Image (cartoon, rainbow, N blue to C red):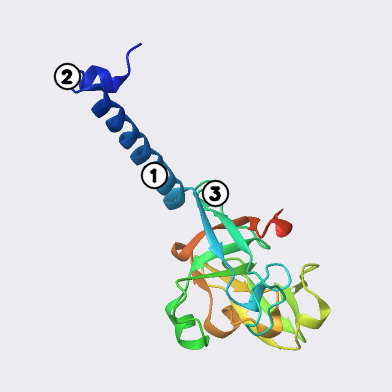
Amino acid sequence: MRNPIDRLFGRLPKPARVALDWTLTIIGAIAIVLAIKAWVVNPYRIPTSSMEPTLHCARPSTGCEAKTSDRVLADRVIYHFRGPRRGEIIVFKTPQRARQVCSGSTGSSVFVKRLIGLPGDTVREKRGFVFINGKKLSENYIQPARRGNDDGKWSVPKGEYFFMGDNRSASCDSRQWGSVPRANLIGEVFMTYWPPWRISFH
């Protein structure tokens, strides 16, 4: 079977056809990578300590445990097939209110937090422990020293989601700026891929 380039551009000299073949191959590869990044899987860096120690940020930033920030992959497709689930780590577009309330977040277009409250839930924090609709939430991903000692109560509106960081005492999250509209959700974090010794699935 003849190469499509040979069929379409058979009158060109062979060196020109080879160069054209390579050019189109490279352009096609770049287009595929960009399409995957835009619609399927996208990488993100962890810039703050709000998700420590689940996801590391880099010293010397306050509260960070590592020399290198974790890089994670988010599945941008999954929420087209099912709804977000409590306990998932999710990348979402930074709400406008968060840009105003959270110091150091004005330049961040996305946040990475854990989903705590679903639409219609009543979320209550009592001395750092979380209760959903009156039932205590099991959170083995939080270190006792990072739980904090805060109190509060919030109702999650229909079509919105309530997020908190795993490093509760150092996380600017839905407790400060409110719940997040469904349209802001980008995807579920399913893997830490960098640095190599931190590779893991979530």
**Quadrant of res 89:** bottom right
On residue 65, the disc is: none
Q: Secondary structure at mark 2?
A: loop
| Frontmost residue, 2 versus 76 | 2
Identity of the residue drawn at 52% across and 88% down: 103
Query: Considering only order in the chain, which callout, 2 or 3, is on the residue closer to the N terminus?
Result: 2
Residue 202 visible in the picture: no
Asked where in the image residue 46 lies, by quadrant, the reply is: bottom right
Along the line of sight, the residue nearer the viewer: 3 or 12: 12
Q: Nearer the viewer, residue 179 or 100?
A: 100
Q: Residue at x 69, y 56 (%)?
A: 196
Measure how far apart labels 3 and 2 are at the Cα level.
47 Å
Please tell me which residue is depicted at 54% across the width and 49% down the height of the picture: 78
Mark sitting earlier along the chain (1/3)? 1
Residue 125 visible to an observer of this rendering = yes
Q: Which residue is mark 2?
A: 11
The residue under the point 57% across, 85% down is 176
Other-residue count near label 1 (Cα within 10 Å), few / some / many at <14 / 14–19 / ≥20: few
Left/right placement of residue 43 relative to residue 200 reads left
Secondary structure found at label 3: helix
Frontmost of labels 2 and 1 is 2
Quarter of the figure that contains the N terminus: top left
Q: Nearer the viewer, mark 1 or mark 3?
A: 1
Where residue 118 appears, as percent x and y from the top left, is 60, 66
Disc 3 versus disc 2: nearer the observer = 2
Residue that mark 1 sits on:
30
Mark nearer the N terminus (2 vs 1)? 2
Amino acid residing under circle 2: Arg
Pinpoint residue 136: horizontal percent, then vertical percent. Answer: 78, 72
Q: Which residue is mark 3?
A: 78
As drawn, 4 above or below 38: above
The amino acid sitting under disc 3 is: Ile
